[in-house]
Structure formats: structure tokens, C-alpha cells
Amino acid sequence: MSVDSIPFNKSFIETQFPVSKVSKESYKERKSAQGQTLTQLGKWWGRKPLILVRAAVLGLLLPATDDPKKDREVFLKLLTMDDEGTWERKKSSIPANEMQKYLSSREIDEYFNDSKLRGDLSRKDKEELQRTVFMRMGYDARLQYCLRPEEIDGPSPKAWNEINSHLGTRASTIPELVEELGIRQFGARPTVGDCFCGGGSVPFEAARIGCDVYGSDLNPVAALLTWAALNIIGGGEEVVAEVKKAQQEVYDAVNKQITEWEIEHNEKGWRGYAYLYCNEVICPECGWKVPLLPTLSIAERMQKVIAELEPDVDNKSHYIHIRQATPEESKKARASGTMTSKGMVCPNVDCPGHKSPIPIGTIRRDYAGGLGLWENDDIVSRPDDVFQERLYCIRWMESVNGSSGREQVKWHFCAPDEYDLKREEKVLSLLRERFSEWQEKGYIPCMKIEPGDKTDEPIRTRGWTHWHHLFTPRQLLYHGLLSELIHTKYSEAYIKVSLLIGLNRSNDWDSKLSTWDNSTDKPKNTFYNQALNTLFSYPSRGLSLISNSWFYTTYTTQIETKTEIYPVDGRVLTFSSDLWITDPPYADAINYHELSEFFLSWYEMNFKSIFPDWYSDSKRVMAIKGSGEDFRKSMVEVYRNLTNHMPENGAQIVMFTHQDANVWADLAMILWAAGLQVTSAWCISTETTSGLKVGNYVQGTVLLVLRKQTSEDVAFLDEIYPEVEEEVKKQLHSMLEIDDKEDPNFGDTDYQLAAYAAALRVLTRYKQIEDIDIERELGRPRAKGEKNPLEGVIENAVKIACDYLVPVGIDSWVWKQLIPEERFYLKGLELESHGEYRTGAYQELARGFGIREYKNLQQSDKANETRLKTASEFKDRDVGGEGFSSSLVRNVLFAIRQTRQEEDTSAGKVWLREYPGYWEKRKEILELLRYFAALGMNTNMEQWQEDSKTAKMLSVVVEQDHI
């Protein structure tokens, strides 16, 4: 079969996509945290998993043939997500106790002695046993023992034979295949572009798998990170070796200077590892100085260390003693401190603020003019500042000879003595000597903090007006030394960029906004979330601890395709691309343009020495942000420009975080006005759980696949509704038909998402919809609560999907008799039974049924722990009244509860008999009872075990009931 033998009508991703497996691989990659390929280059918010990008690019390049099952098999082979591919990726042995869970009693007897593998098994026997168990595992379980797809060379030779046979290609590597498929579609190696390149995921992964790439971003920090991904990580082993050499040279030089200055070693020869500071304020009630300590626990991992306050009556202040503690003392100290969520607790027992916390706003003088603003030359608190800064603890490293003769580290936590304070003064003096020169030469920041949603925080809460105010003198001195060497010692762009990345990693992990983590005895980074959070207590790193962020391990690959990266506005770029894959700041809560100035301030003055054609301004005014009319118009300009710089057979994928019908409706209008037509959409789970993400948050990333709009057809809005209904049903039917019942590819939310996509396909296939003036709709402000005219079409599409997807075990006729709240509850239980606990899934379900309030049906609404109440978890007050409370489903649930409570089925039967129309509704009641009875057999529904048994008993009684 020749390379041109398969006609290209639609791409694979326009007809199907392995949503489940790509989601699981994306989650595995994100859970790798700092082990991810690009995160080593430094902080950027919302980087997309590389496996998601790889799957998207290949999905656009692979054709959809008349054998969809084989298409899917080949696609999974390419991504090494099939059985053989995951076996190739297996990196570690499955433990004996885990293996036994997948073996029969006979097999356990054959291979094990007690709980251990038999000693006489050959290596081949052990390998065969590992493979047997591995193949019996579900996909999630397998992934625990697998490398990521990017960590192996790709499909096996055998797999390539099958891939080439199906596609008519001659490839033996993914880049070779990409080039062949690109030639087939576009006449040359395919070009992938991304004008919102951010942390570089799309350009990097597209280049790594063999595409030419163009990447741009309005923000120069994003462009720099993307350039680094392609030219440092993608530069090959020789480049990485040179980078490591330069890193070591700079570090050694700084280490030598700091040692000579004697500012990091004490009289015992110990070296400072971390310096802990706190703010200190004058209590407005009693006039005492109060150190602001959110907790008195300092260390809990290697040793228990706490702080204790002792009154210094003569100076109306407090000594801070540092000592080792018992576990009980440590636990008590953890819950103690002078700062609580309600305000400052004055340690002076005679002060009114000792019992009633004083609000921080009172201390900051929020209602009396606020804080005094710092000047550029201020590098420590001024005498009249509200917030003074106090060094209260130092973590020391002592080098000792261990029992084996090898050098070991002994750790000490100590309060600073007079000599330590003198060293602090020397640090300040050394910085002052260099301060003006370093600012003039751009070695340390001199950039002002411009007001903004996030940047107002340090100005308002501390009076800091310049970016260097966010660093202690020690941090500015150390980082300034690193910066000076970067700009004076090296000239090659890739060396300077790699060192600037090390510097900015150090800035992220070593600022006044870094928290001290007493559970690990180490500092955390500044951007542990998407804000500039000022702190009352914070660490400053010693040089040996800075080394953890200065040195970074890079994954090495050799990118050999053409790459172009620039900071440029997507509205005016002139580069053409076959495929555009973008992750725009759509209705985004992340203020990239503001937060990135934290990093930009450290190299803005020297940027042009590395990239003469680049600007060094965050372009905050031009940033696309928000969700109003200006935002919509800007987005249309960007995507219209991308569409104009794409061939007729080109395609786009827009990634965005799915929120609600209004977001979809606005996005539909934007893409429609830009001359694009939606062909498909898929939702991939990309978010990991985090204790920092309190409440409900969206976990999915939608991939919206688009082509150029070429139709001249015109329609009226009322004509579109029946078309949407037909399209939704057609879409759901095709997905149900292709889905693997044993290894489901689509989750419940994917079917709802398909309804959105179906609606958008219908809407965007028309050149014009007569009822809608699209330019006017995009450009006019909307009143609060006012709907986009397309929103009704999209909401109706989801309602059709929800009505179409009847839960297994419920008759479609019974389903049609139920009110929306009842349908939501039953469908929600089906979500639970599939192991779905994401809040977004239930939010989406509620929207589909047109329900705004459903808290009374939930037992938990915590993120990733969302579930509905069981029959017994409903209260008496939840029955009767209107809506769900008086519905048939609610009465059946109450009957189950009564039966279980009284341990008598007659109690439930009596309740049901009093329901209006009991005898006419008996068939529906029986069906519901059997549905609830079946829930207990599902391993995800342990909370239903007892209620399910009760439902089963009650169903027998109802079935036998007679007049």
C-alpha cells in the first residue's frame, strides 16, 4: 500500500479519541510533579501534559478510515497505550503480594511458597508470571509500573509493521511517520503553530515527534521558556553537558566569594542552610512588640523543633527561644502562634488582644491611610514601618565524620546570637555597596510593581513598590552574584538562557513570598499557587540550599526540525502553519501578565543582549484577559488571523477549561466569527488533586477540533433546534457503538460534552444565522444574567443528551415519567457507580437537566469526593413539600430508610401504600427498588451496601402486595 493510497477526508481525532487512556496518562504525567520534562525549566501556570499534545498532533495527522476499530488499535499502538506498548513501558516488577491478587488459588500454589515466590523459578518463569499478572491488570493499575510514553523510543518493530500495514506508510519512528503523513496532507513535513505557547508544551512536543514548529506568546517570559525547551532540553547531550559545566562554574565562583566574606559560617564552622525571618509589629492595644508567627512549630521531619516566646519586660518585646521538643510539645506548638485567621493574638497576657485577636487590617492601618510606601533604595524595613523584619532562627549544617568514616551532616536549629546578627549587618553592608551598580547593569531588579489584580497585594499589604522589595538582603546579594556572573562571563545565548532559568528558579524558591514547610524542614516556592501572597514568616536560603534550584536536571532529546519562537501578539503574527494548537487565556483566572513580571524584572534590562529582536515588556495593557466584550473581540482577531494563516485543509485545536453553557456559547460565536467550524470535541482529565485547591474546581481540558468554515448556507435559529437534536443523537449513538464495554473509553461526562460539540457543529456549519448579528453580539456589553443567543441551543443539546442516556436498569418509559431532579439523582448514582467523584461532573449533569440547586441531594460536595446521599442519609425533613421532596424517587428512598430503621419491611410498605396512585405506580416503584438494590453489588458503592439489601427485601414485599 503506497503512502497516498488512503484518501484523507477526516482525521482520526474528528471521529474518535481514546479519552480514557489519554486522561490517565495525562494524570500520571502531572503527578510526576518536578519529574515532568518541562517543569525543570521553571514556573509557568497551566502547562498542558506532553502526552496530551502528542495525542492531539497524531490525532490530526492520522486519517479516519472505514475501519474505525483498526484506526483505534493503530492509534493506541503509536502512543504505546495498547497491551504490548504498556508491557514495553513496564519498568518495575510487580511485588509478590500484589501479584497474588490477580492469580487463582491453583496459580498461587504453583508459583508461591507461603507469601514468597518459589526459589527454584527460572528467570523466564518469573518474566512469564509478571506478564500474566500485568495483562490481567486494569489500565490504572498497570501505569504504576510503567514509564511514560515519552520515556521510551516508541512502538516496537512488530507494532510498526501493523501500523505501516494499516496506514500504507514505511516508517520505523514517530518522526518518520509524522513526515510521511504530513507529505500526504500538506505536501511537506507538517508545521504546528501555537500563539499562546506559555510554558512550551505544544511547540516542544510537536517538534520532538517530528513537526516543524512556530511558537509565540505576547509574554516574553513564556517565549523564553519555550525557546529553552526547544534549544536546551531539545539541544541534545552536548548542549546539556555545556550547560551543566557553566552552572557549576558560576556556583563555585559564588560559593568562593561567600566563603571569603565569612557571612555564612559561624564560629564553630557550621554553615547556614536556611534563615527564618518573621515580621514584628507594635501591638496597638498594649504597645509591646509582637513577632508574627502563624505557628510555633519549626521542624517536624528529622527532629521536633519549636519556638517559645519569653517576655522581655524591659524592652516590651519577646525573646524567641528555639529548642527541641517532644512529639506532644510539637503537636501543641503546631496549633499555637501569634497569628490566626482572625488576626494577631498578642502574647502579652495583660493585653486585651491576648483573648480577642486584633484584625490584621487594624494593624496595617487599612482605615487610617494604610502603610507607608517603600522607595527604590529601601531594602530593609524603615524605623517607622508597621512591619519590621526579624531573624529568629537559623538552620545550621555541621559536617561530621560518620561511623563509616564518610562525611555526614548534623543539623542544628538555633536562635541567632550577636555574631549572627553582625553577619546580617555585613550582608546588608555588602549589598548596599553594590546596590546602585547592580541595578544600573540589570543584575538585580529595579522595575516598579505596576498595580493590578494580583500585584496590588504586595503594595497594599506591605507597602512594597518595586520587585526587589520581595527579597531579603541575603537573597538579593546571593542572587545578584549569580546574575552578575551570568551576564559577564558568558555570551552564548543557550548558556545565558540556561543560567537565567536557574536564576529564576532560585527566585521562585527563595523570596519573601516563599513559605517555610515545617513538615519537610525546607522552604516551598513562591508560586505554590497563582498569586503573590505576602507572609508573616518566611525563610531565606543559604547557598547550599539555593543549589537545589540553581542546578536542574534536564531530560535530553535531539530536536532536528525547524523551530521559530518569538514574543508577538497573536493578532498580528504573519507565520503560516498547517495546524494550530492553542490553549488561550479563555475566561482565565490566572493573571499571567502580572505574575510573570516577578521573573521578568530580573532580566528585562539584559534581554536584548540575548535576543536583539525581542522586547522585554510584559505588554500587560495588550494582554487578552477577562470575559467581556473587549476580550471577545480580541479573541476573534486572534483566531481570524490564525485561520488566515492556515491552508484550506489545515486544522486547529483549541484547548480550554470547560465551565458552562455560557462559556461554550461565547466560544462558539468567537470561533464562528473567526471563520472556523467545529468538527469534534473531547474532554481530557488533566488536573491533579491538591490540598491547595479547596472547593470545587474543573479538572477537564476540552479539545475543540476545528476546520475552515466553507459553507454559504443560511438558517434561522428555530430551524436549528431539530438539527441539533438529530446531531446529538447521532453522535451519542456512534460513541456508544464504538465504546469498549470491558475497557470503557468514554466517561459519563464525555457523552454530555459530545452534546455541546454536536450543537457547535450544527451552529458553525452555517455561514449565517439570520436571527443573530454576530458582530453586534460579540461587541456589546451584556447585563448581568443576560444570555448569549446561542446559549439556549447549547443547553437544549445537553438536555437531549441527558434524556437520551438512560441509566442501566431503568426502563426508558419509566425514565420519561420522572421529573428533572429525579433523573439527576438516578444518573448521579450511576456516575458514582463508575467511580466518578469530580464535582464538575455533577455540575455538568445538573446543567443538563436544568437544575440550579441540588445541595440537598449531596452527602459531600468536596472536590474529588462528591457523592449523593444514600436512602438512609436523607433526613425526615427532606420528604414532603415540593419538587424532589415529594417525588416518587424520594418516597421510595424514604420507604427504604423506614424499613431499615425499624427493621421491618411493613414500615416501608405502609409508607409506599400512602403514596398517591400507589397501585398505578407499582411497576415504577418496583423498578426503582431493584435499581437501588443493584447498587450494593458495585465495588464503588460501599455506602449503599445496607440500603441495597433493604431495597431488595422491600422489592419482594411490594411485588407480592395485593389488594
Image (cartoon, rainbow, N blue to C red):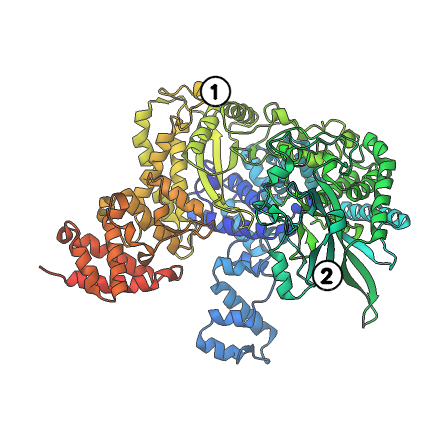
Q: Residue 704's spot in the image, x, y percent?
A: 48, 36
Query: In which image quadrant can residue 535 be found?
Result: top right
Q: Position of residue 312 (x, y in %)?
A: 74, 52
Which structural element holds mark 1?
helix
910 displayed left or right of 407: left
Q: Is residue 870 left or right of residue 374?
A: left
Q: Residue at x 39, y 50 (%)?
A: 739
Name the spot of residue 108 as percent of width and height, x first: 49, 76
- Say which mark, if any, is on residue 689: none
Please say if the residues under marks 2 and 1 sit with CB atoms less than 8 Å apart: no
- Which image quadrant for residue 444? top right
Residue 749 figure quarter: top left
Most extreme residue toward the right is 260
Please provide percent x and percent y for residue 161. 55, 52
Q: Which mark is residue 779?
A: 1
In-front residue for pair 712/142: 142
Q: Residue tagged by mark 2?
A: 323
Please, what is the three-letter code of the amino acid marked with disc 1? Gly
Front residue of this view, candidates 299 and 900: 299
Left or right of 649, for residue 748:
left
Q: Tag count in the figure?
A: 2
| Mark nearer the N terminus (2 vs 1) | 2
**Residue that lies at the very extreme toward the left in this rendered image:** 963
Say which of 854 and 705 sits in front: 854
Q: Nearer the viewer, mark 2 or mark 1?
A: 2
